[in-house]
Amino acid sequence: MGCFKKEFNGSTLELTRGDITTEAVDAIVNAANSALSGGGGVDGAIHSVGGPAIMAECRKIGGCPTGTAVITGAGELPSSYVIHTVGPVYRGGNRGEAELLKSAYMSSLKLAKEHGLHSLAFPSISTGVYSYPTEEAAEIALSTVIDFLKVPSSIELVRFVLFSDSDLRAYSSVLEGLGD
């Protein structure tokens, strides 16, 4: 499976399978925990590849409530910044998870805009150890990003870097269904 692209108001939305730690974009988004203490999955990979400078900045920040985002340097990563956001743990879908997930994406996008960034890469937030169903998460993620891109900003590229072929298929299917 290759890369899928759609244009929105002069900005590009891409879907690809890969390793987010190799993305040479202005910022990669980290699916962090609220303590900003590192962890497994995407979070662990970003801290491992990026080195101790990222954790040192996270310790100074102290924490990040679910649905919000903070920004640090990228250490040894090829990107310039890491935007750390905290998605919700999925507990059946009736505890505000959808609103918190949307807020995690929106907070990240707003932070990128505030810093004048032009490109960023997202993982599939909350779908790993936080157990959010991938198709539902993709619907929230993609519709939030598309709505954001419809308003002019500095952001020219938003790339979803998905870890597995099944995640890429789910996101591609949702994107096809959303249309323009």
Image (cartoon, rainbow, N blue to C red):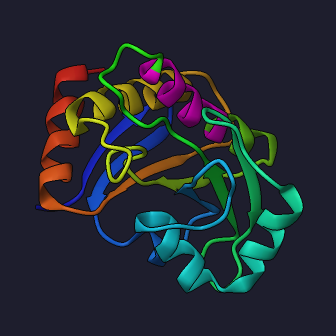
Nearest the camera: 95 or 56?
95
Q: Quadrant of residue 37?
A: bottom right
Q: Does residue 106 show up magenta in the picture? A: yes
Nearest the camera: 92 or 55?
92
Q: Residue furthest right?
A: 60
Q: Residue furthest front?
A: 91
Could you tell me which quadrant the N terminus lies in?
bottom left
Q: Position of residue 68 (x, y in %)?
A: 67, 36
**Magenta extent:** 97-108
Q: Quadrant of residue 179?
A: top left
Q: Residue at x 16, y 41 (%)?
A: 170
Q: Is residue 8 above or below residue 63?
A: above
Nearest the camera: 24 or 30?
30
Q: Position of residue 102 (x, y in %)?
A: 50, 26
Q: Does residue 7 show up magenta in the picture? A: no
Q: Main secondary structure of the magenta part?
A: helix
Position of 121 compared to 4: left or right?
Answer: right
Q: Residue at x 41, y 54 (%)?
A: 123
Q: Is residue 95 above or below residue 78?
A: above
Position of 180 compared to 50: left or right?
Answer: left
Nearest the camera: 61 or 2?
61
Q: Position of residue 61 (x, y in %)?
A: 85, 56
Q: Residue at x 44, y 16 (%)?
A: 95
